[in-house]
Amino acid sequence: MRNHFRDDFSTYHVIDYDPATGEVLNRHTHQGYGHETTWSRGEAWAIYGYTMCYRETGLEEFLQQAENVAGYIFNHPNLPDDLIPYWDYDAPGIPDEPRDASAAAITASALYEMSRYAPADRAGQYREWADRIVASLSSPDYRAEVGTNRGFLLKHSTGAGNFEVDEPLVYADYYFLEALLRKSKIEQGKTLF
């Protein structure tokens, strides 16, 4: 948390440490547009990972960090109305940049889990955002027809601006299915774990 985040809770992708001292040598955003831009899947991993850290430790600072990252995502002026982010929140060609369905699916799954831990006033907002993402991913814009898309469920994932552009990705499908399962359990009043 100390080294991977900027003041606005956007993330760096890679931190290089001095192996002898632990001092930060460099901060990079390898799969984003530039070192000082925000790769959308990196933000998704952050919200998901810190929610999981909270689940496993009960330490409030982890839940707070996940909520801070959610604040960054959902207050970003470049987040499209359908809540499926561009591959980098700061990519220069927005709105003509590729989207990343995988970042959206990871975020939706994390939001469903966060809604189980957050106070009621924020939990409802997290579920609402997750529901909107799942609805978007379930639409024909992102959900592939059976027998197409090389068998993948979701279209329009982007690994980076120069590779895996507008491709199906296995982790997009995984987190989409996880989000759907979590949504179903919440609606049925069941526990997630």
Image: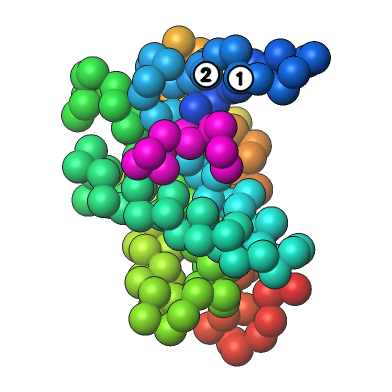
On-image quarter of the N terminus: top right
| Disc number lying in front (2 or 1) | 1
* The residue stretch that appears in magenta: 1-11
Residue 178, by quadrant, is bottom right
Q: Residue at x 44, y 76 (%)?
A: 123
Residue sitting nearer the eye, 3 or 80: 3
112, above or below 12, in the image: below
Residue sitting nearer the eye, 62 or 120: 62
What percent of the width, then of the height, locates residue 94?
A: 21, 26
Amino acid type assigned to the residue bearing label 1 in the image: Val
From the viewer's perspective, is 129 left or right of 25?
left
Magenta stretch prevailing secondary structure: loop
Mark sitting on residue 179: none
On-image quarter of the C terminus: bottom right
Mark sitting on residue 27: 2
Q: Residue at x 41, y 43 (%)?
A: 9
Q: Residue furthest bottom?
A: 189
From the viewer's perspective, is 45 left or right of 57?
left
What percent of the width, then of the height, locates residue 80?
A: 24, 44
Q: Which residue is mark 1?
A: 24
From the viewer's perspective, is 83 left or right of 131?
left
- Residues at circles 2 and 1 in contact by the CB criterion of under 8 Å: yes
- State whether residue 1 appears in this view: yes
Mark 2–mark 1 Cα distance, whole angstroms, equals: 8 Å
Circle 1 packing at 10 Å, graded few (<14), some (14-19), many (20+), is few
148, above or below 104, in the image: above
In the structure shown, which secondary structural element does the residue marked by tag 1 occupy? Answer: strand
